[in-house]
Image (cartoon, rainbow, N blue to C red):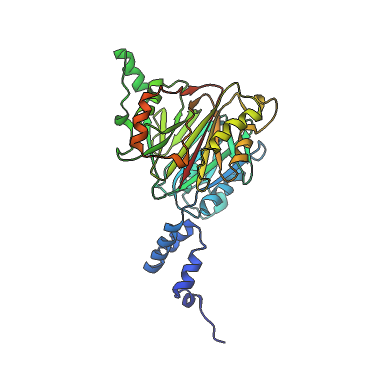
Amino acid sequence: MEECHASEVLRLPVILYKILSFLPCKALNSCSRVCKVWSEYAATIKKKRKKIEWMSLECDEEEGLNSKTENLSAFIEQLSSEPDHVLMFCTSRLYETPVSLPSSHPTRFPRNAKCEAVEVTSFVEKLLPKICPMFALVADGVVDQKTNKTCEMEDRDALTLLSIPKIDGFDIYTFYVDIYTYANRMDESGSAIFEVDQVSTVPADKEVKAILFFCDEPFCPPEIGYTLLQHYKSCVIAGGYVDNFNSNRNSEASLMCIALCGPRVHAASVIIREEVNTAQEVDKIIKKLKDCNIPEENSFAFMFACIGRGKGHFKGSENVESSVFRKYFPKTPLFGFFGNGEVGFEHLNKYEENINTEKVSSEIPNKPLPKLYHAYTTIICLVSIN
């Protein structure tokens, strides 16, 4: 029997395509540099992949984060879809813990190579494609998304990563606001008008379905949020006050808004108020989200809670709100944090009742604006791309 060299087998288009289809995205990018045919096959395979992927890491004090860096690297290496945007939720203590990163300057003796200490956000940024924006939200606690369970990490160190690929009909735009500039202008004139068009990067023809709203200062002028609500009519606004946020696109602003846009995006939100302190009451509220009939396929959700809630609020019971969410949305990953104040309102937009933006927009101004800024509450925002 004649031997067949591997290079000859790879000349067969069917076999080559089949082999390449099993490779993760980063390996595909390397293979695409072999020749024109491999490049075309790799591009075709990547175009078909639209998978939303995520991971979580929990660290104890003895292990530290350095023992988990291999897990972070492996997650990025094994992504099947090329990341278009990455969101990270990280506990404050973990964010402040330096990660040892091997020096980019090689030496003859690897054991003697120097390591530089970097923040975990910088470590992850170096693993991602340079064109991929990454947004890190830092708070006292985070919502830890595991394979079949969601944990509310209030007093343990953890981080979660959400990788979102480029999907047709779904766009993400980020804009930043320097609230001090706005506040100073208001002090000088006695009043100030917040001009959304001056700061927003969202094109005028895009449908804004949800805005994730994050501030790392103790106070944000309420006019900013309410003006956004009036400007982008019929959209969800959800977020809160964090200890810090970190973006590889802007490091100076004190307010970051992430706009989720496009005709394929469907979003809804609920608010769990301060007086709600039993699982039964939480169940009734999250069921309203379920009744919106938003498809769970290609969906993800955010939970922004007050640091005062959690097991202390529910008489020692852990993971109450996230467990109820998991009951109704077993296939939807949940991310978020325990912060210093919440931003959002109840917005129940039923999937089968989605109508064109113009009709919705004409009805919204006649209604009073909902309360947007809260304390001791939980905001849950569901997003689906279909």
Nearer to the camera, 309 or 125: 309
Residue at (42, 57) in percent of width and height: 47
Residue at (33, 36) in percent of width and height: 358
x, y (%) of residue 235?
41, 33
Residue at (52, 53) in percent of width and height: 77
Q: Is residue 264 visible?
A: yes
Task: Name the side, left or right, on which 96 lies relative to 208.
Answer: right
Q: In the orientation shown, which residue stands out farthest toward the right? A: 316
x, y (%) of residue 82?
45, 52
As displayed, is residue 271 above or below residue 158?
above
As displayed, is residue 368 above or below residue 104?
above
x, y (%) of residue 111?
57, 51
Q: In the orientation shown, which residue stands out farthest toward the top? A: 190
As displayed, is residue 159 above or below residue 50?
above
Residue at (57, 34) in percent of width and height: 286
x, y (%) of residue 6?
51, 75
Q: Quadrant of the N terminus?
A: bottom right
